[in-house]
Image: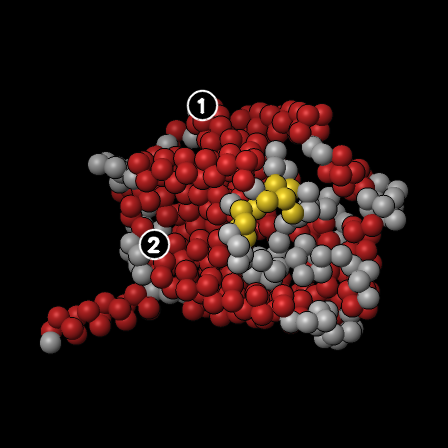
Amino acid sequence: MSEIFESFKGKVRNVSKIDWYLFFAILPILGAGLVTMNSFMGNDSYFTHQLVWIVVAFSVFFIFSFIDFHFLRRTSVVVTLYSIGVLILVALFLVGSVSKGAQSWINLGLFSIQPSDPMKLVLIIVLAKYFSRRHVEIAQIKHIIISGVYAFIIFALVALHPDFGSALTIFAIWFGMVMVSGISKKHLILVIVGGALIFTGLWHFGLKPYQKARIMNFVHPLADIRGSGYNAYQAMVTVGSGGILGKGLGYGTQSRLKFLPEYETDFIFAAFAEEWGFVGVIILLFLFAIVLFRIMKHAIRGESNFETLFCAGLAIFFVSHLIINIGMNIGLLPVTGIPVPFMSYGGSHLVTEFAGLGIMMGMARYSRPAHRDLMKNEFVGY
């Protein structure tokens, strides 16, 4: 009887470690995505499919919340994850399905998955592992270069599919985690110069014509509003037409009349803004702010530098998606195929997001306040 009681107590403690403030802040964001995509569809296929993915994502979240993730500190585990991920990205060139000009999907019959999404999570784990071991040595340029090589391999493979939006997010994760790790100003300048050189190389040898057109439309947004600039222009019009209070649920004419493309995925923010207006957007951003605040709170409470850096990388992951997507919806950034976290239609990004949060909840089970000086020898034996 005592063993059963102790087991029950353990399960209660595990459930109590779940951040319910974060969880319940995400629920209305999920709801906003569902009602927005459903209000413009002649049938409920997107709505129904997304509900299924939400159930799957919730299951992953709660299962991961009960796992002890100390094993992620082991070099062998991290190398295996990274290697498998890279091999899958390479295999996409042979077996990947083409969708919207990008060969970045694996068709499994009933559904398809986009490996670039979970690879973002793998990159966060790799960089958290690397920088946690060398946190006090980050001032040395070699560590920035080595970490950059890890990120660049993934970046290059994803960009060549081509999936410029995910590639941009991968760069943002690496750059953000380097910044968090304590890069010097001198090395920051070198990173910026290096990034400029990489972009120049991509422009001449890597980017497809339609991707170059999107960037040129960013520089000259009204140059070709009937052609390559149509999506960006319609997104700006849709956001602006929402006004202060919005047109009301189901009354977004730009989306309902099909002027706005991809309103269930890339431009769901614009569709939401048209229906709910400026006030709705402020509430939505407030909910995302709660999510990010809770993630950073877990980062502060991390048992070690590894957990802290993982949570910081997860926050960068969400922030980069938000900034890039909202930026392209309001004409501040070029149009790239990237979802709004928790809102856009699709299972790969949704499961990845909840998997990342589930890993964070698993780490919270053994979080502890500790002085960082006590952690310098924490990885002895790994």
322 and 352: which is toward the camera? 352
Residue 37, percent across and down?
A: 67, 67
On the question of residue 254 being in view, the answer is yes
Q: Residues within 10 Å of mark 2 (few under 14, many from 20)?
A: many
Q: Which residue is drawn at 78% across and 59% down?
A: 260
The correct choice, above or below, for 229 with respect to 275 in the image is above
Residue 338, percent across and down?
A: 63, 49
Q: How far apart are marks 2 and 1 (CA)?
A: 29 Å
Q: Which residue is drawn at 68% across and 25% down?
A: 205
Q: Residue at x 38, y 64 (%)?
A: 62
Which residue reaches farthest left? Answer: 1
Q: Is residue 265 left or right of residue 149?
A: right
Give amino acid for label 1: Lys
On the question of residue 279 being in view, the answer is no
Q: How many labels does the image show?
A: 2
Residue 208, percent across and down?
A: 71, 34
Q: Name the residue under label 1.
A: 142
